[in-house]
Image (tube, rainbow, N blue to C red):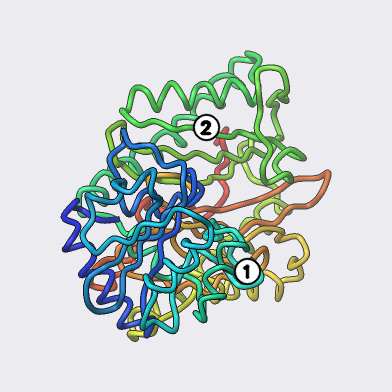
Amino acid sequence: MSETKDYPAMISDIQEILRKEKIDGWLLYNFRGSNVFATRILALPPHIMCTRRYFYFIPKKGSPRKLVHRIEEWNLDTLPGDKTVYLSWKSLGEGLKKTLKGAKTVAMEYSPRCAIPYVSTVDAGAVELVKSAGIKVVTSANLVQYFEARWTEEQLKDNLEAARELGKTAQEAFRFIRQRISSSAPITEYDVQQFMLSEFKKRGIKTEDAPNCSVNANAANPHYEPTKEVNSPLKKEDLVLLDLWAKKDKPHSVYADITWMGFIGSTVPNEYEKIFQIVRGGRDAALNFVRDSFGKGKQICGYKVDDAARRYIAAKGYGDEFIHRTGHSIGEEIHGNGANMDNLETHDERRIIPQTSFSIEPGIYLRDKFGVRSEIDVYVSKDNEVIVTGEPMQEKMVAILA
């Protein structure tokens, strides 16, 4: 994400990437706010009405070009570039050809065969319209993350602080469980969730959605969330999964996201620890692959990180029980707009680039029995250093009553 609203500098950065990607230009199209990436990247004044289609074309060299409707012909005036105004649908097509003159290949927020749906915000008809002008349309997936997923130095600093407080919250939650169980006081998943939220407030971190505490079979549902009305009690001999995410309570802060596992007993049963160690092995296989790759100066895509974790877990006989991607991009939203570590739900061919962060969180989910997940966050620095932001990483399941 850009640290400045200096548009000429932003356009210069885009043009540099376009030349590197060998793309003639980036066509940012929007209609009534349908393209969230165009909205954020162009950062138009919030008071203007955008009820008609606009196109903003940034060529790999030279001045940008605008195509705007007669009713809203001033909407892009905060941006540099020559303006073409259209009125009718016929003049739209003519204006688009003029705007794209000289270009053969342009990037748009589109993904072939919807392979990466997270960036597919331009509708098929708009893509067809551009193709009718004799233009080849390619995905902007790699371009988007340069301006949507990279962290500033301040965001990294805030994240490291949030990750530290998040880790402390997880340990305090285990202590809270131990205290209630040891005193024979009733406790539910919802109680633990609300305790973690109270810790967030004390520690100056916040979240859009409440954290998760799930026990036993509930932990076998990766997206289980307790509520005041729907929750399970915690008892001795229960397995406990804590999944918590939060960020500093300040503008433009970015999330930290971790998962820790515990058992309400003085020792962890072999069955639980065995599965945890397999999950941990998958986590570490993915992390080591990222570290080795960047250490050798190799470019890697998100799907390859997923492959590394999935290959390890499958070799242990639990491939069919690893039912989600290995990780997701992290930014100002918990699920960010950079590369995901995914070769299951999608085939994510986006490259992992410096100054971005993502989770590594493999899991094994035994239906109607229990689930185990281990989640860490990784940040790749400007210098290609691979940093785990929430250390220490969990190395064995916590015996909560030990």
Quadrant position of the C terminus in the picture: top right
Q: Name which quarter of the figure residue 304 lies in.
A: bottom right
Q: CA distance from mark 1 to mark 2?
A: 27 Å
Label annotation for residue 209? 2
The amino acid pointed to by label 2 is: Asp
Quadrant position of the N terminus in the picture: bottom left
Label 1: few (<14), some or many (≥20) within 10 Å?
some
Q: Judge by depth and name the residue closer to the eye, 296 or 69.
A: 69
Which residue is pictured at 36% across the width and 75% down the height? 25
The amino acid pointed to by label 1 is: Ala
For the residues carrying marks 1 and 2, which lies nearer the camera in this image? 1
Q: Name which quarter of the figure residue 293 lies in.
A: bottom left
Which residue is pictured at 23% across the width and 55% down the height? 79
Q: Name which quarter of the figure residue 332 lies in.
A: top left
Q: Judge by depth and name the residue closer to the eye, 148 or 256.
A: 148
Q: Judge by depth and name the residue closer to the eye, 297 or 346.
A: 346
Give coordinates of residue 81: x percent, y percent. 23, 63
Q: Secondary structure at mark 1?
A: loop
Q: Is residue 267 left or right of residue 284?
A: right
Q: Secondary structure at mark 2?
A: loop
| Nearer-N-terminus badge (1/2) | 1
Residue 319 appears in view: yes
Label 2: few (<14), some or many (≥20) within 10 Å?
few
Label annotation for residue 99? none
Residue 285 appears in view: no
Q: Judge by depth and name the residue closer to the eye, 203 or 11.
A: 11
Give coordinates of residue 34: x percent, y percent. 51, 48
Query: Relative to 255, does residue 24 appear above or below in the rendering?
Result: below
Give coordinates of residue 275: x percent, y percent. 68, 57
Residue highlighted by disc 1: 115
